[in-house]
Amino acid sequence: MRTRIWLATAAVAAAAVLTGCSVPETSDSGKSDSGSSSNAVKDAAKDATKPATGNAPQKDVTLSKCGTDSFGQYPQADLVVKNHSSKSSNYIVQVEFTDAEGTRAAEGTAALNNLAPGQKANEKAVGLSKAPSGMKCRITKVTRYAAP
């Protein structure tokens, strides 16, 4: 019981350190609008297919390789993150791993802290389920926070 409480406390503390006191910039490729009008839904669908504009966080992350870990069992996405903002930033990148038919088989997350403006870093997101045959990787969400 004490271990669970300690782990929960550690997770909350890590999240607080990672997010700092800033408002995050989020880019979600599965963007949707909860509005009730059909125009709002159509607009949200249209926005989700548009390329990132301006200084959107998703422009900072590229998928360089989709494969498996060194054991050849678990899905792994190799990512390149370049901070295009004017401030040092922290990133959380979510990746989904799908089979050949597009069914999600696993998901992974990569986190980076204190990436300086213009700085580039290589990171990995690893799934915890066995890699499916015909696997594909897709970045589903990028969140960028100004580093404290």
Image (cartoon, rainbow, N blue to C red):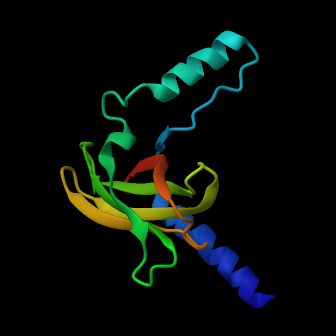
Residue at 69% in and 75% down? 8
- Residue 125 or residue 121, whichever sits in front: 125
User: In which quadrant of the rendered image does the N terminus lie?
Assistant: bottom right
Q: Residue 72's x, y, as percent?
A: 45, 79
Q: Quadrant of residue 112?
A: bottom left
- Residue 124 or residue 54, whichever sits in front: 124
Residue at 51% in and 38% down? 29
Q: Residue 11's x, y, as percent?
A: 61, 72
Is residue 56 visible to us here? yes
Relative to residue 41, is residue 138 drawn left or right? left
**Looking at the image, residue 75 lies above or below residue 3:** above
Relative to residue 72, is residue 32 drawn left or right? right
Residue at 26% in and 50% down? 83
Q: Residue 126's x, y, as percent?
A: 48, 70
Q: Residue 40's x, y, as percent?
A: 65, 15
Residue at 37% in and 29% down? 51
